[in-house]
Amino acid sequence: MDILIPYLHYIGIMILMGALLAEYFIVKQDVSAAQIKSLANIDLVYGTAAVLVIVSGLLRWFVFDSKGAAYFNANPLFHIKLSLFVVIVILSLFPTMKFHKWLKQVMRGELNGLSSKEMRKTLLFIRIELLLLALIPVLAVMVELGKRFK
């Protein structure tokens, strides 16, 4: 378990980042009905990866990390990292709801094109998620090395 849980955690993070980048590159262009179906599937992968990251992260924090929970609990950078992930999860709800709305419209044959305003707003949320997600590895390294605010 000392190897499996961190492995699953890292794999989950890589899948999550890959799915988010895929969403970004699809939403960045004019989106077709087929791409909306792909977005819904990619978002399902994203959500599943987020669950894997959360579960494996909690297991590492409370059960399987040799440093113990007290080490992480005492480090404010760990709490910032955790808070950033929570913010990312909350931000991801907006694109998820949009993708499902668009998918329903595609399934009913009601999609007449997406407004550029709607696309820009969805893209903004994804960009913010990517930015925040890019900060997490830096914080993770700092926590692992025992760095703190001075």
Image (cartoon, rainbow, N blue to C red):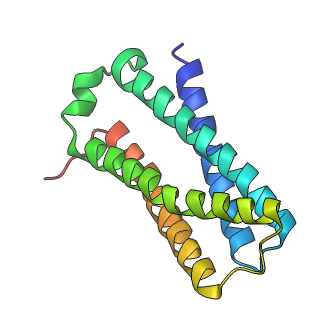
x, y percent for residue 45: 68, 44
Q: Please state the total of marks drawn on the protein image.
A: 0
Q: Is residue 102 above or below residue 58?
A: below
The answer to whether residue 126 is left or right of residue 63 is right
Residue extending farthest bottom: 116
Q: Hey, which residue is sitting farthest left in the picture?
A: 150
> Residue shown at 63%/47% (left/top)?
46
In this rendering, the answer to whether 40 lies above or below 32 is: above
Residue nearest the observer in this picture, 82 or 110: 110
For the point 33% across and 41% down, the residue is: 143
Write down the quadrant of residue 62 in the picture: top left
* Residue 4, position as x, y percentages in the image: 59, 19
The answer to which quarter of the image holds residue 63 is top left
Q: Residue 37 appears at what percent x and percent y?
A: 80, 58
Q: Residue at x 60, y 28 (%)?
A: 8
- Horizontal relation, residue 89 to residue 4: left or right: left
In this view, which residue lies farthest toward the right? 34
Residue 64 appears at what percent x and percent y? Answer: 42, 16
Q: Which quadrant holds residue 113? A: bottom right
Query: Taking 89 as reference, is 6 above or below it?
Result: above
**As drawn, is 126 to the left or to the right of 30?**
left
**Residue 46 located left or right of residue 136:** right
Q: Of residues 98 and 43, which is closer to you in this image?
A: 98
Q: Is residue 137 above or below residue 116?
A: above
Q: Quadrant of the N terminus?
A: top right
Q: Nearer the viewer, residue 94 or 133?
A: 94
